[in-house]
Amino acid sequence: MFRILAGALLLSTMSLSAYAAGEPANTAKIWVDAKGMTLYTFDKDKKGEKASACTGDCIAEWPPLLAKAGAKAMGDWTLVPVVTADGKTAQMWAYDGMPFYTFVDDKKPGEVTGDGKDGFHVAWDK
């Protein structure tokens, strides 16, 4: 199942072959961006905070999921101010109060090389 909202997708990793065989299936859902790149949350961000805790060199390595100009919060999706790697103030997307980031070392859709690094973890659906 794919759900497009605010430039992010929810990706189901359910194994259909296992499901069809009557075996247990993994139904975990992770968030990815519109390009299929894994999204992460940061341990130092606190749910509902008014700004990202990732700044400076952190933002260069963990780019935020930026919102387009004029984007509006909706439902569980909110906007959080962030200072980007080039020093500009922008808005990034947060889901259920937690800002979303990508990781520069993830080179292909579906990679999760940042999970557990620097206090970042794969963003799972609640």
Image (spheres, rainbow, N blue to C red):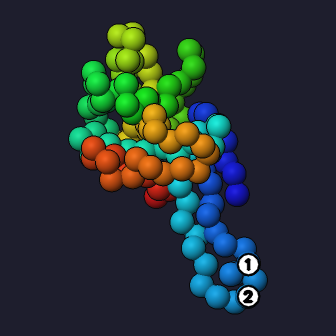
Seen in the image, is 3 located left or right of residue 51? right
Task: Give percent across and percent down for residue 14.
Answer: 64, 69
- The image shows residue 95, relative to residue 60, as above or below, that is below
**Which residue is at 54% across, 50% downward?**
111
Task: Give percent across and percent down for residue 86.
Answer: 39, 11
The disc label shown at residue 17, or none:
1
Q: Amino acid at mark 1?
A: Ser
Q: Nearer the viewer, residue 110 or 79?
A: 110
Q: Secondary structure at mark 2?
A: loop
Seen in the image, is 20 located left or right of residue 87? right
Residue farthest toward the left in the current orientation of the protein: 44
Seen in the image, is 42 located left or right of residue 90? left
Task: Give percent across and percent down for residue 4.
Answer: 67, 42
- The image shows residue 34, relative to residue 71, as above or below, that is below
Q: Amino acid at mark 2?
A: Ala
**Which residue is at 43% across, 29% downward?**
63
Say which quadrant the N terminus sits in: bottom right
When asked about the image quadrant of residue 24, the answer is bottom right
The disc label shown at residue 75, or none:
none
Q: Is residue 96 visible?
A: no
Q: Is residue 119 visible?
A: yes
CB of mark 1 within 8 Å of CB of mark 2? yes
**Crowdedness near tag 2: few (<14), some (14–19) or many (≥20) residues, C-alpha within 10 Å:** few
Q: CA distance from mark 1 to mark 2?
A: 6 Å
**Crowdedness near tag 1: few (<14), some (14–19) or many (≥20) residues, C-alpha within 10 Å:** few
Q: Secondary structure at mark 1?
A: helix
Task: Give percent across and percent down for residue 72.
Answer: 54, 25
- The image shows residue 99, relative to residue 115, as above or below, that is above
Q: Nearer the viewer, residue 83 or 119?
A: 119
Residue marked by disc 2: 21
**Which residue is at 56% across, 15% downward?**
69
Q: Nearer the viewer, residue 22 or 105?
A: 105
